[in-house]
Amino acid sequence: MVTTAGNCSDSEKCVSQLVNLYSARNASETENEDNSMHTFDDLIEHLGVGRWSVLYFLTASLYTACCAMQALSGGFIMPLMNYTCIPPDFHGLPSMVQDSPPSSYSYIPTATNITTTITVIDECRYEVLSQDGVNRVESCTQWDFDHTDFGNTLTSQMSLVCERSFLVPLYQSVYMFGSACGASLGGLLSDKLGRHGVFMVLVILLVLMGSGMALLSNIFIILAARTALGFLHTASMQSSFVLVMETSTSRTRPLAGMLVMVPWALGISVYGGLGYAIRHWRYLQLSATLPFVVFFPLLWVIDESPRWLLVRGELEKAQKVVDKAARWQKVEAPSRATLQHIMGRLQKQSKEEAKKYNTAWDWMYKQALDLVVLFRTKQLCMMTVVVCTCFFSASLVYYGLSLSAVNFSTDPYIFMALGGLAEIPSYTLTGPVLLKLGRKPPAIFCFLITGISLMLLPFISAELEWARITLAMVGRVCISAVFVEFFLYASEVFPTEVRLQGLGTGLLFSRLGSIISPFINDILVPLYPWMTSVVFGGLSVLAGIATFILPETRDKRMPDVVEDLNKPIIPDKTEKVKEKPDLEDLSMLA
């Protein structure tokens, strides 16, 4: 540039040449920069981390906290309660005995003028003895509930005891069933209709459904609404999580994936405080739903995923979103030609994927075939059984501990709040521990510590409540940590060709465990209160022992095909681990 200026005879011409050279150099640099962006990940790496990407994370985090209160609301809205039978004509007795129903009393009905004795047999039956020799056993139709721990609940208001007691665990189980359906269909809805659009619609429906449920008076309609809430919860959380993953750089995705669960733990703690302050189930349900409205403005600030827009061919909309992201992140926006190039690559990949399933029957056939493939060899079959056992046990124990506060503490509200706080280390420290110690040792350790701590509970006196709560919290921390860890561990032990199938099958058993867990709590606690700790602890120990079968995967090359399982898994010291699991694919299964 100096040489050119020196050769200029006219100063204006010299300046013009300098400007042209500078512009040409900038154009060349811009072209080279654009040419370096061949994939969508390259585009996100160029945008980097800033206000735009953090806003998606904050939105998903706030939403996760709100969902936690809905997911575990059964612990306070429809809990197990102590109750006694109120036999007929009790309310006609003298007022001196109205405060506590007697177990046996006599009276003379005016219709028969025969002395009749009524004896309460248990919480659900009473015996009628009359002097004329007519004896019969009747079922109770009224009950006196103990409101020491809980106020007005669905259990007491709708008398969900005795023959109707199965509806109590069903309240939580139908929510988990709806969640399982939402996990299956949520990804399809997001792929077809867009992540942001589906997220907005599902959030609005969730607020309407959750608020409307507080006004219902029919238990079966309430259960139907609860099932819908479970579906909306998982499907919407899946959309929000995918938005976070598709707007995060490759380096921040693992961190965002783990930290987004910290608000879940905080939401559980907040719900413990709400339950203590609000003792009427209708107001408590409204209080757990209305916080969703707080972040409604965020739904209008965040945009559709630029990745989804490019896959759908919405270049103009994608350009606007990317330009906005570039302004917020304070980087140069990529050119239209670059976005066209990335769009072409994404659409090509999408079309290749779509060719696999010409019809719905092709998709169903592929899913059935995938399950068969998981049992193709003895080693793969054993690996599948172990992963499914661990997912089932982790989910069943986690929700069992979360929903059985009355079994471990005299104050269910403190137990709920402490349980949420105890989960925070599980979500923040698991990543560094896995990097330092590998996958297998922490998983075995967490399962065994959970099992031992829970199986010790029956031997701890009820007077030593602090010891019982401590052991329960130790189990809560460990089972939460291993639950998070197994998403990564399971994705690494399976070969590439069956990785998503193996993880998806494991998560299916995880949903099954969450559906069964409430029944174990509510069936065993009234009969043998110590039995739940033994069941949860035993399953944890079993899962820990089974994990010994799985190979260590840290710093190991993961197998590509099933046949590679018969080969020794050697450390990969020269290059990065091959075929890292795609976090976006894993998030669709979560």
Image (cartoon, rainbow, N blue to C red):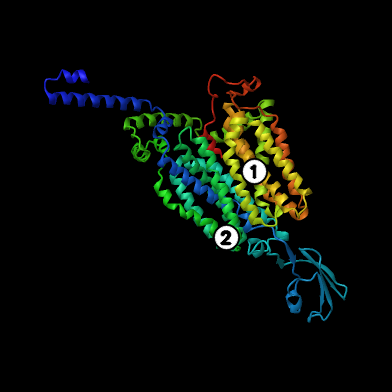
Q: Is residue 535 left or right of residue 27?
A: right
Residue 102 occupies which quadrant of the picture?
bottom right
Report which residue position mark 1 lands on.
477
Q: Residue at x 28, y 27 (%)?
A: 26
Q: Residue at x 64, y 23 (%)?
A: 565
Q: Is residue 161 left or right of residue 333?
A: right
Q: Position of residue 61 (x, y in %)?
A: 50, 46
Q: Position of residue 323 (x, y in %)?
A: 34, 38
Residue 580 occupies which quadrant of the picture?
top right
Q: Position of residue 371 (x, y in %)?
A: 62, 32
Q: Amino acid at mark 1?
A: Val
In the picture, which quadrant includes the N terminus?
top left
Q: Position of residue 28 (x, y in %)?
A: 29, 24
Name the residue nearer the viewer: 113 or 286.
286
Residue 115 occupies which quadrant of the picture?
bottom right
Q: Is residue 398 visible?
A: yes
Report which residue position mark 2 lands on.
284
In the picture, which quadrant includes the C terminus?
top right
Helix, strand or loop at label 1? It is helix
Q: Amino acid at mark 2?
A: Leu
Label 2, residues with CA under 10 Å away: few <14, some 14-19, many ≥20: many
Q: Image height check: is 320 above or below 206?
A: above
